[in-house]
């Protein structure tokens, strides 16, 4: 089986991206630039004993995505405990709404945002009362 084991988020400004993901989601970073031969920071996204994967912030190698274009690649969605507080952090740290919060009835709250690098990210809060 081809299970997803790692992700890469392409960024223009590494320090800005590290600040955004660190302050919004609590991620920590390890400098793996020497191994990658470019600015490349491993992203530790949570406790190794909990479900989920780690990834990296990678220096973008071309132009950033344009606003309004369809997703070209993958969208990473982060599981959160409090949708509204994470949305506030996203906005406070330079993110913008791509698709506002909506209910997946009986399952969860979902929404999409532009990070500081122009990428689209999702947040997802399980809630069986979502309507």
Image: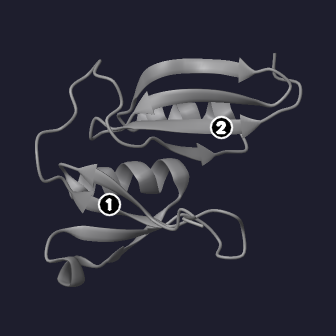
Looking at the picture, how far across and down is residue 38, in whole percent? Answer: 14, 71
Where 105 falls versus 40 (above or below)?
Answer: above
Looking at the picture, how far across and down is residue 36, in whole percent? Answer: 21, 77
Q: Check disc 2 and report the residue beneath it.
A: 124
Q: Check disc 1 and report the residue beneath it.
A: 57
Taking the spot 50% from the left edge, 67% from the top edge, the residue there is 54
Left or right of 66, for residue 94: right
Looking at the picture, how far across and down is residue 113, in whole percent? Answer: 45, 30
Q: CA distance from mark 1 to mark 2?
A: 21 Å
- Residue 101 figure quarter: top right
- Residue 67 figure quarter: top left
Left or right of 104, for residue 15: left
Quadrant of the snapshot with the N terminus: bottom right
Where 35 falls versus 63 (above or below)?
Answer: below
Nearer-the-camera pick, 71 or 96: 71
Taking the spot 21% from the left edge, 26% from the top edge, the residue there is 66
Looking at the picture, how far across and down is residue 126, in whole percent? Answer: 78, 38
Left or right of 99, for residue 62: left
């Amino acid at each position: 089986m081809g299970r997803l084991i790692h992700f890469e988020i392409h960024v223009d400004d590494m320090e800005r991206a590290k600040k955004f993901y660190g302050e919004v989601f609590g991620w920590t970073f390890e400098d793996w630039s020497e191994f990658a031969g470019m600015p490349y920071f491993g992203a530790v996204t949570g406790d190794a004993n909990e479900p989920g994967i780690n990834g990296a912030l990678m220096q973008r190698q071309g132009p950033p995505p344009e606003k309004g274009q369809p997703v070209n690649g993958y969208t990473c969605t982060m599981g959160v405990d409090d949708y509204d507080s994470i949305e506030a952090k996203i906005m406070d740290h330079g993110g913008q709404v791509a698709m506002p919060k909506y209910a997946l009835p009986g399952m969860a709250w979902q929404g999409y945002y532009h990070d500081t690098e122009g990428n689209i990210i999702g947040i997802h809060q399980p809630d069986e009362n979502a309507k």
